[in-house]
Image: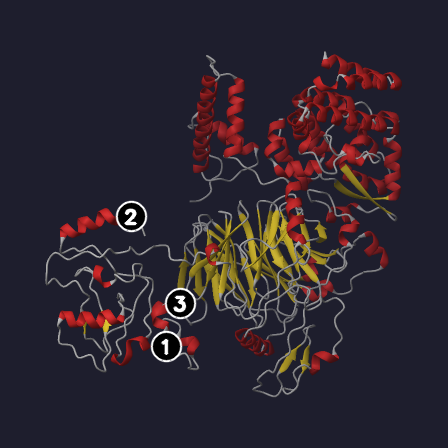
Amino acid sequence: DRQTLVAVLQFLRRSNLRESEEILRREARLLGDDLGAAALSPAGAGLLGAPGGDADAAGGEALLSRVTTAAATAIGGSAATLLLYSNGFAVGGGVAVEDQPDVSAVLSAYNQQGDPTLYEEYYSGLKHFIECSLDCHRAELSQLFYPLFVHMYLELVYNQHESEAKSFFERFHGDQECYYQDDLRVLSSLTKKEHMKGNETMLDFRTSKFVLRISRDSYQLLKRHLQEKQNNQIWNIVQEHLYIDIFDGMPRSKQQIDAMVGSLAGEAKREANKAKVFFGLLKEPEFDVPLDDEDEEGENEEGKPKKKKPKKDSGGSKSKKQDPNAPPQNRIPLPELKDSDKLDKVMNMKEAARRVRLGPECLPSICFYTFLNAYQGLTAVDITDDSSMIVGGFADSTVRVWSVTPKKLRSVKTAADLSLIDKESDDVLERIMDEKTASELKILYGHSGPVYGTSFSPDRNYLLSCSEDGTVRLWSLQTFTCLVGYKGHNYPVWDTQFSPYGYYFVSGGHDRVARLWATDHYQPLRIFAGHLADVTCTRFHPNSNYIATGSADRTVRLWDVLNGNCVRIFTGHKGPIHSLAFSPNGRFLATGATDGRVLLWDIGHGLMVGELKGHTDTVYALRFSRDGEILASGSMDNTVRLWDAVKAFEDLETDDFTTATGHINLPENSQDLLLGTYMTKSTPVVHLHFTRRNLLLAAGAYSSQ
Amino acid sequence: MEPAKMASPKSAPKDAQVMAQILKDMGITEYEPRVINQMLEFTYRYVTTILEDAKIYSGHAKKSNVDADDVRLAIQCRTDQSFTSPPPRDFLLDIARQKNQTPLPLIKPYSGPRLPPDRYCLTAPNYRLKSLQKKVSSSAGRITVPRLSVGAVSSRPSTPTLGAPAAQAVSMSAKVGTPVSLAGQRFTVQIPSSQAAVKSATPTTPTVQNVLINPSLIGPKNILITTNMVSSQNPSNESNPLKRKHEDDDDYDNL
């Protein structure tokens, strides 16, 4: 008779007999302690399912929910937790009853909005309306189809109306955009409520709001239509699961919209991209450069060569104003410059002087390193900054380091022998090396799963590798042994990278977070959580203050190292992102994904500024040339393409309207920007690297099909 | 090892055909033929595990047949064990918030290789040297001491050698009686593993680490004794089978 009580309440509510409902509820509360939580939760869901479009019902819902929670606490902790558990994974911003946010948050995000058999009617009604609307509004309103379809389908599945869910899916899944087909395939396999429990991505999708950007006119049109009596259900769903970011201005065209949508969570809200980002570079420390010719030029932070007299050491930097876009030098603690680092910088500057200036007339030569006999096992490649060593991570869990130059790899002598050498001699760094161990290849064993990411440290002393076994390992390149295993991700780690200054490194994996570590801490320093699906690619900004992560949820996020906040969200890719590259001046980001497009982003304004179409398969490697003139992209379609970066970034329209609304008008200039396409012999390109003199090195494993 | 198109269903057993159809439904069009076998194996293993568990649960509940509830319970328990999924989003956001509140630690300058504390590193030796008990040698006159060999220039420091305290080396050389002139020559104490047990060599240092004898300790005699991490110390004495058997019993003695 609990059920009958609850059913009576439901009936009274449906017939809008408010007062009698109140009385009955109050009396029911007195019997409170035998209202089982289990009986309550489906009943509660059913009760709330009554049409709740108007404010009154919202008040009623709140009251009932208070009854629910009161009864739950009266019953006892275990029952209450049972109730909360069944609603537990719907916590978090899912419900949109605006005036009762705190209470509603406790309840399930999937109330029964009306009769399940009528869902198809609602959807086709909306479809009809949108198709009959004006052309200028139609493109924007069509954005509603996909999120509504998915949420309605998931609601039917969650409330266990399997047959209705199946027929709903059958009827409407063909109407969705082509770039959602992968998601829809996953969705088609979710037919029961139990299937949803293990799928974290789907759960996140349910609880987070899908963001849509619609102009005010289109929104008014939609709202007017949906608030009519018969369309109330859809209005509820829209309010509950969608976040509509309204902007004033012209509605967007289909092309503009298509460029920006595609991610699992819709687009990015405008506020998400408004935080200030310090994208400038840190000042290079000035120090005396031993000159061997008079025209040696030092570099300042903009990369413009500056004439510097050898006597002065910091005079030059004082005259330059602090770049307003550069972070303060001590914003994040960075390791000090050791003598070996200074020597390295001197070498760098000398090489920079001999660097080839690239441009559309002067394309780089490309030297391709092919890994033979890898049998599709090559999963990660990295090359040191001075191009002296190359490392390959393999599916058989080994990490192999090769020397690219004629100088072989040596390990340090044993402790016993080290005591014999003369420590005061000039070439002590040579003497500590053991000649007997010289070889071109060193194999490092230690991981217990395929190695998915590798990264050399800038000082070439350490090597990082991350693997499917969930650990990130730090190897010493002086003894060729493993030093530390960093455990934190308990799931495959897809990518890792050292900071450009060393000491910090970032890793991203299947658990949907990226972690920032320091080599001397066994636990991560920062955790960057926010992605809805695996983090597949992680890169540091050249000033080491920001980290970009690309994910399988098709967004790219930029995180601040100092406080772990997400400062930018870039949507627009239609597939998981596999490569990221920052431009050397720190202002732009290039991203490549499985959809074969390379997108260019302006970090400061948070806008997409370019789209490079040409590749036909996943873009696995992206790299800017040393001065940022050329962008090289390597892909699974066995080609390396060179793009004109200078032209792509010049004359950006950044007037107020663009920045305010985030509208972009991308020119269709991919063909103009493409400087060259270079095919390999059935070797997908996995890594690209510009040497200090702007020679392009590429790496991949020969695959014989 | 080339990925094949879908395997021909004509001669495949029904299970394999079903599996191929499932793969097709999930949108996987290119796969090696072994994939079907692996998936079938997994299916078989999973189903039998669940059914066995279900049988146990129904037996525990004193039921005569296995019914759906038992199977459901079995599935639920196994899911929590084997198919763990990453933590939910709100949990991650929570721990991220906690972790991100602490400021980044300052970096101490000039602190050498920056590694975590030793117990979190993998740099410790992964073996232990056995401690040796002083055993009274039954056979008198047996050389149970490291043999001193005069090898000045030819002694290479990298040969595996075992170190012994300097004083003992000197005294032992006296015991051995080998006419050795120690002045002004460099010696390497070599202990061939096939020979005498070196138990007595280390009564004072029960655990021999990589002891590096400072030449200054040795004094004017300039005997350099080197040790090596890869120790060739092998207490078992091949020439005396009895003794070796004794050693084997002590393999896991207290250290």
Residue picked out by circle 3: A411
Say what secondary structure mark 1 lies in.
loop
In front: label 1 or label 3: 1
Which residue lies most toward the left here? B140
Question: Residue B245 location, x and y as percent?
Answer: 18, 48
Q: Residue A420's quadrant in the figure?
A: bottom left
Q: How crowded is mark 2: few (under 14 residues within 10 Å), some or many (20 or more)?
A: few
Q: Which chain carries label 3?
A: A
For the residues tagged 2 and 3, is the chain the same?
no
Say what secondary structure mark 3 lies in.
loop
Q: Mark 2 lies on which chain?
A: B
Q: Foreground residue, A38 or A694? A: A38
Give the answer, above or below, for where A42 lies relative to A522: above
Q: Which amino acid does label 2 sit on?
A: Tyr
Q: Is residue B190 left or right of residue A398?
A: left
Q: Can residue A481 be seen in this view?
A: yes
State the quadrant of the N terminus of chain B.
Answer: top left
Question: In 3D space, how far apart are the residues under numbered discs 2 and 3 (Cα atoms)?
Answer: 34 Å
Give the answer, above or below, for where A208 lies relative to B164: above
For the residues tagged 2 and 1, is the chain the same?
no
Q: Foreground residue, A406 or A616? A: A406
Q: Residue at x 79, y 50 (%)?
A: A270
Q: Foreground residue, A618 or A604? A: A604
Q: Which amino acid does label 1 sit on?
A: Ile
Question: In 3D space, how far apart are the residues under numbered discs 2 and 1 (Cα atoms)?
Answer: 39 Å
Question: In 3D space, how far apart are the residues under numbered discs 1 and 3 (Cα atoms)?
Answer: 15 Å
In front: label 2 or label 1: 2
Q: What is the number of the mark on residue B252? A: 2
Q: Which amino acid does label 3 sit on?
A: Ser
Residue picked out by circle 1: A421
Question: Residue A184 location, x and y as percent?
Answer: 65, 35
In front: label 2 or label 3: 2
